[in-house]
């Protein structure tokens, strides 16, 4: 049974799972918003690191920095230079979204100021960048890929540590010369922290088998979803690292959340 408990950046659903019986029957399907919650919502009613055990990552979805071709900017270095020379704007799919975090990491690493223009969702943000009314956008690759291929937006860099097979000719933000600018947006499964280890390990094994099925791969690849084969322990460690990194981003960028 799937129960979609949306709201408050996913923290409502996560809180329900944190309180659930740790028997392997109540699972949390979440994304990088999970590790961003302590930075965006300091008063969440659970401990993001201690109240959950990570099971398996379904994959990572790169964010790609896009801009209208009409802007005449062809590389990420040119974008950064333009931002330092004047005032640029950047779109996001909402305050605290993955598209917001990815842009802020790049902005802080590259050392430029820009005006954040949040929208209610990705389609609106892409439209405004395509028209040139907003300068750039660290879009989720799944929503941007078709527009990139059609030439409606130009891809300058991807946010992942390595290049993505979906855009093999597009460099990473780190390759472009900006260390610690990468932002990994993942989707995955977690369970309550006291779930027995043998249950966690079995859920991990069985889910990995499904993820490796050709039919499943055929669904994921066209969306630009890259494999992210982490052990449960490595996944837990990644989340702990991201929590600290996201809190640091909020402080460095001076972000305020309601």
Image (cartoon, grey):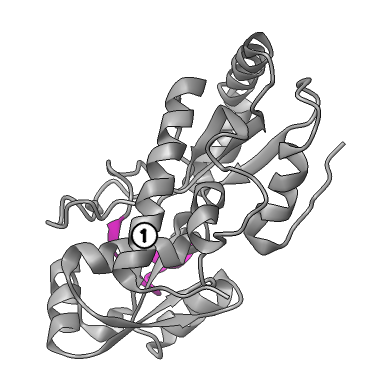
Q: Residue furthest top?
A: 198
User: Which residue is depicted at the point 74% across and 49% down?
Assistant: 13
User: Can you give x and y, in whole percent of width and height, for residue 194 in the image?
Assistant: 67, 22
Whether residue 188 is situated above or below residue 152 in the rendered picture:
above
Find the magenta span and give its range: 146-158
**Percent coordinates x, y for residue 68 in the rendering:** 34, 79
Query: Compared to 199, does 150 lie above or below?
Result: below
Rate crowding at label 1 as few (under 14), some (14 to 19) or many (20 or more) other CA atoms within 10 Å: many
Question: Can residue 105 be seen in this snapshot?
Answer: yes
| Location of residue 48 with respect to 8 vertically, above or below | above
Image quadrant holding the C terminus, namely bottom right
Horizontal side of residue 44 vs 229, given as left or right: right
Q: Quadrant of the N terminus?
A: top right
Q: Residue at coordinates 45% horizontally, 67% vertically from top-left?
A: 147
Q: Nearer the viewer, residue 23 or 117?
A: 23
Asked where in the image residue 230 lies, by quadrant, the reply is top left
Residue linked to disc 1: 64
């Amino acid at each position: 049974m799937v129960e979609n408990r949306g709201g408050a950046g996913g923290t409502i659903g996560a809180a329900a799972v944190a309180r659930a019986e740790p028997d392997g029957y109540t699972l949390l399907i979440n994304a990088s918003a999970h590790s961003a919650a302590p930075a965006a919502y300091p008063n969440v009613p659970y401990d993001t690191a201690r109240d959950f055990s990570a099971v398996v990552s379904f994959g990572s979805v790169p964010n790609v920095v896009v801009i209208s071709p009409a802007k005449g900017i062809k590389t990420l270095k040119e974008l950064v230079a333009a931002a330092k020379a004047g005032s640029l704007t950047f779109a996001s799919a909402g305050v605290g979204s993955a598209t917001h975090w990815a842009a802020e990491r790049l902005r802080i690493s590259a050392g430029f100021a820009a005006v954040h223009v949040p929208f209610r969702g990705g389609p609106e943000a892409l439209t405004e960048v395509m028209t040139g009314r907003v300068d750039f956008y660290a879009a989720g690759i799944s929503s941007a890929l078709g527009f990139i291929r059609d030439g409606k937006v130009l891809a300058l860099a991807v946010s992942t540590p390595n290049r993505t097979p979906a855009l093999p000719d597009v460099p990473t933000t780190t390759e472009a010369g900006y260390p610690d600018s990468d932002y990994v947006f993942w989707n995955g499964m977690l369970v309550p922290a006291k779930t027995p280890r043998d249950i966690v390990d079995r859920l991990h094994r069985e889910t990995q088998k499904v993820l490796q099925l050709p039919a499943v791969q055929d669904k994921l690849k066209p969306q630009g979803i890259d494999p992210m084969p982490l052990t449960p322990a490595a996944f837990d460690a990644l989340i702990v690292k991201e929590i600290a990194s996201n809190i640091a981003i909020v402080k460095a960028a001076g972000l305020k959340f309601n």
